[in-house]
Image (cartoon, rainbow, N blue to C red):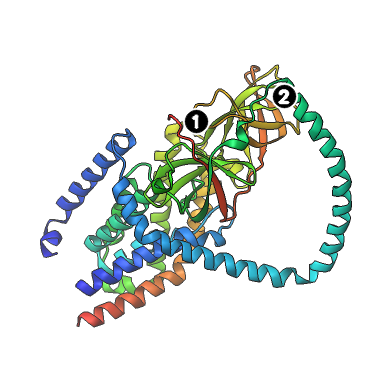
Amino acid sequence: MSFIHRHKRFFIALMSFLCLAAIAVTALGKARPTVLRTALGFVVSPLQTGVTRAANWTRSKVDFFVNMSNLQSENDALKAENAALKDENTRLSLAMQENTEYAKLYELDQKYADYPKTGAEIIAKDPSDWVDAYTVNKGMSSGLAQNMAVLSDGGLFGVVTDCGAGTSTVMTILDDRSSVSAMCARTGDQGFVRGDRELMNDGLCQMVYINVNAQLIVGDEIVTSSMSSVYPKGITIGTVTEITDDPNGLTKTAIITPAATFRRLDKVLIITLKNES
Amino acid sequence: MVIRVIVMAVIVLANFVLQSAAFQYITVLGVTPNTALILVCSYAVLRGDAEGAILGFFAGLLQDIYYGPVIGLGALLYMLIGYVCGKPLRDFYKENYFFAVLLVAAGAMFYQFAYYFAHYLFRGRTDVGYYFRAVMLPGTIYTVIAAIPLYGLVYLLNQRLERTRG
């Protein structure tokens, strides 16, 4: 210790140099600290799981007592909604039948339902204010790998960016670094769904590079594109809520409301298909 | 010495767990208090540059390993912050809350700018004004508010450790 104290400047310079070297090596993708990550995950993830579950439990109890007074009015509202839904259900099942016939007609790929999936629990979040990434409690030992698509509530949640043996990091589509090749389900117009730090707080993202002649309108469903090499095609991303023309006059940008839910530490589904990066 | 190392290792690890798991419940306007930074700055003020730098290095490395993808950036930043915050080590500084919190504010702002520079500017996100208003400033303010009670905790812990050592 006294040796370090005597040569403080030297040690700071040395450690800074080592850090910069590590940054260079890892930024270029030459090495990943999978072993270290696995070891750390082994110690940390049970604690994170415990804290997250305790926090979730406490919040659900608090919510219960806070909402008790609202239960009666909520019950009435739900009954009315139920009646409406029953009616809608009948109509929809008819539409469904029609749809199946159309699907056969166009030989649409029904793979979406058949993708192998595995459930995982979100146990922690990257504490940085700049990113939107979560830790889930499954990793390589459960068959997870980098670039696998992650779903929540039937919509695209994000992508697996890093794996340890028992934990993985999932970057959401709201993250500023995220970019997903996407298209409009109705018109087939192509674009990229990008995360944006400015929209992230509101739980929104944007679709960029849409051709200015594209026919998409507010309310259209956006799905992953068949041109994507990472994501399986046809996964729901969200709906268009706003469209603006870009200043260059060649492209449009759309604000997308994702179908998945974020901002809640809960369960997600991971499509365990190996994807080339 | 051994006790101090063990206690600080446990605290750094506990902070990491709490910051990543429970602290999401206190997110306000999209920002959370950076408790790792508060821990490093506070400890550096109380124990000097060498120990501040060592604690910062490990606190940063922990985040780097778990959240990546670039390893070494967090370790480097927190180490430098710990080193600089530990420079003016004098006994009368330790009692001075205002001085410690001021150093936390400077450290938090430096960290935010460095993070923006490394992760955003290089991807063509050049609207510094927006990011300053929306992330850096609120993040720093929230961190400073959290630092006021937390510096007191670290101060008491350090007194306890100094007494144990005799």
Residue B47, image quadrant: bottom left
Residue drawn at (24%, 68%) of the image: B5
Q: Is residue B46 left or right of residue A52?
A: left
Q: Which residue is mark 1?
A: A230
Q: Is there one chain holding both mark 1 and mark 2? A: yes
Residue drawn at (40%, 74%) of the image: B153
Closer to the camera, A170 or A177? A170
Q: Is residue A227 above or below residue A193?
A: above
Q: Is residue B144 above or below residue A126?
A: below
Q: Is residue A216 visible?
A: no
User: In the structure shown, which secondary structural element does the residue marked by tag 1 occupy?
Assistant: loop
- The amino acid type of the residue labelled 2 equals Lys
Chain that bears disc 2 = A
Please tell me how crowded label 2 is: few (under 14), some (14-19), or many (20+) other residues with Cα within 10 Å.
few
Q: Is residue B62 left or right of residue B33?
A: left
Q: Which residue is mark 2?
A: A104
Q: Is residue A62 left or right of residue A37?
A: right
